[in-house]
Amino acid sequence: MKTFKTLSILLVTFILFSCSSDDDNNSQQQSTQELLTSGKWYQESRTPGSYTICDKVSYIQFTTNNNFELESFEENGDDCISLGLMTATYTLTENMTIEISFEGELISTEIIGISAQELTLLTSENETLVFDKTEG
């Protein structure tokens, strides 16, 4: 009987401390828009394919006023040289698609994962692109 009572107390204690409050978590979670516009996203990987060191210095940035920036770098000997900053506008749809309008062309990509530190996109060419907050 004493063992049953001890197990019951342990079980209740475990349940109380292992349950999380969804209300607390929801109020602290960031929206997709907030995460997307939280700063520069540096290229980390592409599947299929690979990245060079200079590709990993390249970044994209989404702003709160729906502007999109891309700065790409290429190798020049031992240095990474900027190809310049390209700007466009973007729209984030309800179904987690980013539509980028650049020089009359509409480019769509689907967000398949986003957190404070990582952004994973699926392109219309079935490439998976991973970005993170760390340059290089």
Image (spheres, grey):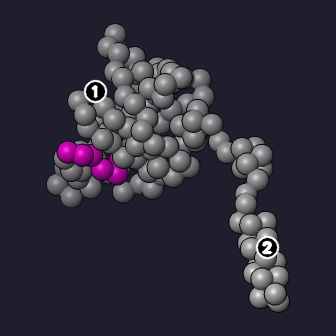
Checking the image for residue 72, the label placed there is none
Residue nearer the viewer, 11 or 31:
11
Q: Residues within 10 Å of mark 2 (few under 14, many from 20)?
A: few
The amino acid on which the numbered mark 1 sits, given as a three-letter code, is: Ser
Q: Residue 58: percent from the left, percent from the top?
A: 35, 44
Q: Residue furthest bottom?
A: 2
Q: Residues within 10 Å of mark 1 (few under 14, many from 20)?
A: few
Checking the image for residue 124, the label placed there is 1
What residue is shown at x 21% (from left), y 50% (from top)?
Answer: 50
What residue is shown at x 38% (from left), y 38% (from top)?
Answer: 121
The segment highlighted magenta reads 42-48
The amino acid on which the numbered mark 2 sits, given as a three-letter code, is: Thr
Q: Residue 14: percent from the left, percent from the top?
A: 73, 72
Examine the residues drawn in magenta and state their main secondary structure: strand
Mark 2: which secondary structure? helix
Which quarter of the rendered picture does the N terminus lie within?
Answer: bottom right
